[in-house]
Image (spheres, rainbow, N blue to C red):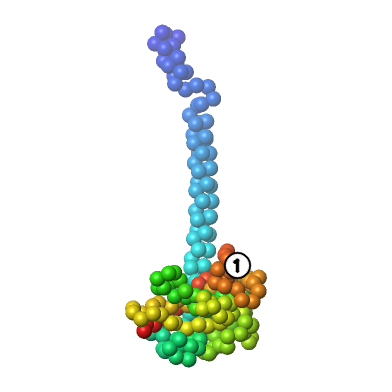
Amino acid sequence: MSNIAQDRARTEDFATPRGHEPGARTFAALGLRLVLLLVATSAALVLATSTDLWAQKRAAATKFELKSASFTSGGIIPKQFTCDGSDVSPALSWTEPPPNTQSFALIMDDPDVPVGTFVHWVVYNLPATTRHLPEHLPGNDELQGGGVQGVNDFPMTGYGGPCPPPGKPHRYLFNLYALDTKLDLKAQARKKDVEQAMKGHVLAEATLMGRYGR
């Protein structure tokens, strides 16, 4: 073999080490591409599944609504439901909750009090079959048909209507929670007790807001 041929052979030998022939490199590249494709496909499936579950939960939560026949959402709460009137509880109703709902909790409070949020109503362990609360509920611990009324900030058991100081109308938030469990609480629980007990158990939340000023 000529010196030129020998030099070319040595050069090609150096450029293409043994075990790394073009066929082997091609096979390895194809294998790597296949692995990457499988990883990407798996990740896409996991993301799609997570997104679908999130979308389902969001859709269920979006459909969950709280309404009142006593006043319109964002409107003025009539005097009869305040301390300036009969101070009776308003009628409330809500739409179908998410699947697996085991109970409901209701908290009404006023976030516009200068010294902090004032709690007007606490109800918990309403049966999962409940879809409304009638007007003028008695201030008993136990509700007919199921459910327990806690203690508000007046303090008293049951409902205590809006009673703001003179000035700008306050907002009153009725927050209804669909829970996946029944709360392990005794009678006369307060808002903080209910909020602590329902952590990690809220399937959906619906809010109704009314205003009242004096």
Residue drawn at 44 percent across, 21 percent down:
15
- The amino acid on which the numbered mark 1 sits, given as a three-letter code, is Ala
Give the image location of residue 4, x and y in percent. Answer: 39, 11
**The one of 143 and 202 positioned closer to us in this rendering:** 143
Q: Is residue 20 above or below residue 207?
A: above
Quadrant for the C terminus in the image: bottom left
Quadrant for the N terminus in the image: top left
Residue drawn at 61 percent across, 79 percent down:
148
Give the image location of residue 161, x and y in percent. Answer: 47, 83
Residue count near mark 1 (Cα–Cα under 10 Å), binned few <14, some 14–19, many ≥20: some
Give the image location of residue 183, x and y in percent. Answer: 63, 71
Q: Would you say 158 lies left or right of 162 here?
A: right
Please give the count of numbered marks on the rendered protein: 1
Q: Is residue 78 above or below residue 123?
A: below
**The one of 83 and 73 positioned closer to us in this rendering:** 83
**The one of 112 and 183 positioned closer to us in this rendering:** 112
Check disc 1 and report its element: helix, strand or loop.
Answer: helix
Residue 128 in sight here: no
Residue drawn at 51 percent across, 39 percent down:
32
Q: Residue furthest left?
A: 168
Give the image location of residue 43, x and y in percent. Answer: 51, 51
Residue 114 in sight here: yes
Q: Which residue is mark 1?
A: 197
Image quadrant where residue 3 sits: top left
**The one of 59 and 108 positioned closer to us in this rendering:** 108
